[in-house]
Image (cartoon, rainbow, N blue to C red):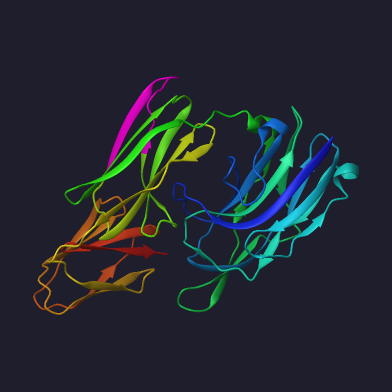
Amino acid sequence: MLYKIILCLSLLATASSTLSGQSLDWVFLEPGEGCGPDTDCSVGQQCYGLSYTPSLTGTATSYTFGFLANCVNGGSASLLGSSCTMTDNTDLDDSFCGGFNVLQFQPSGNTGSLAVTAGVPVILHQVCLTLGVGESMSFDEDVALSLTVSINLPGGGSDTDEPAYTTFTSTSADCDVALPVSWESFTARQVDKTARLDWAVSDETDHDYYSVEWSADGLNFSPLATVRAAIGQQGVTSSYSFDHLAPAPGTNYYRLRQVDFGGTYSYSTVEMLTFTPSVTEQGFSLFPNPASEEAQLLLSDGHSAQTFSLMTVTGKLIRTVNIRAGQARITLSLEGLPKGVYLVRVGEEVKQLVKQ
């Protein structure tokens, strides 16, 4: 049996449920989700993305990983390396799988410039392999090498992230997954100061939940909420809705990520809504942003706001703070809050604040 592995280094951002900590995990890629060749179950080609969840916020500039691909059922292997974003420095050894059932590969890249946010996963690599029915291949960490990502920090300087990794096994059964739901409709409309999202799907079997995702630029999405899937049936249409209570002034982008019980997912179309700030908007700024322990809120001259609010990205109130007459600067403590994206509202104006 010939195991064909195609290694494609990439820096593709993914939207998923926000995770804490730092980790590396292989995830199955549906056709069209990768940076190179597609999963093609008709010929046994299965593609996986190496999902990296950083513990730091900044700009990823290089990375080095070492893995051992164990060819459980023997055979030989050949590899092709292709860089999608970073300069490819991958060291591939394709001579071991036939003789020792182990294939060594050391994916690495440099001269990259990927903005990463602590706790938000991104796909760094893609691996495609061909497995026969009943065959499998596991990916173990090469303990002789370090798993590292170099990150430039927002305030200057750099640091090295060392994500944890757990052995992953790919089997031919990964191609035997439920098809995505059939998207019947997805709409976004403004209801007063709220964004109302409605969607309908059919053939909803073996599906777990929907992740509602939001973006200010249409490129970088963050999860707003999780909506559990109904117990659907083939040929039956199910309808859902969600209200985003605190959309940002300006353009807001929304999409849905449907996830089944096996971890397979698909995306809806992207919908856009524009909210025009009212004439009574109170100008303010936040710095530093991202922040770790505290941030400074600067109010514009002549503001009339009496309070400001700190909220989760879904609009859930965390605290309300009074503003004294004439007060122009307020220290906002972030102590005790988990890392992630928050919203600060002063009057009708809402801005994002990232805790790292």
In which quadrant of the rendered view does residue 4 lie?
top right
Q: Which residue is found at the position 72% from the left and 33% from the top?
A: 43
Q: In which quarter of the image is the C terminus?
A: bottom left
Q: Can residue 351 be seen in this view?
A: yes
- In the image, residue 239 lies in the stretch drawn in magenta: yes
Would you say 213 lies left or right of 136 here? left
Q: Is residue 337 visible?
A: no
Would you say 29 lies left or right of 248 here? right
Q: Position of residue 124 (x, y in %)?
A: 61, 56
**Residue 324 vs residue 264, the one in the foreground:** 264
Residue 355 sits above or below residue 38 on the image? below
Q: Where is residue 90 in the image (x, y as percent from the top left)?
A: 74, 61
Residue 5 sits above or below residue 134 on the image? below
Q: Which residue is found at the position 85% from the left and 44% from the top?
A: 97
Q: Quadrant of the N terminus?
A: top right
What residue range appears in magenta? 227-243
Would you say 98 lies left or right of 147 here? right
Name the residue furthest right: 99
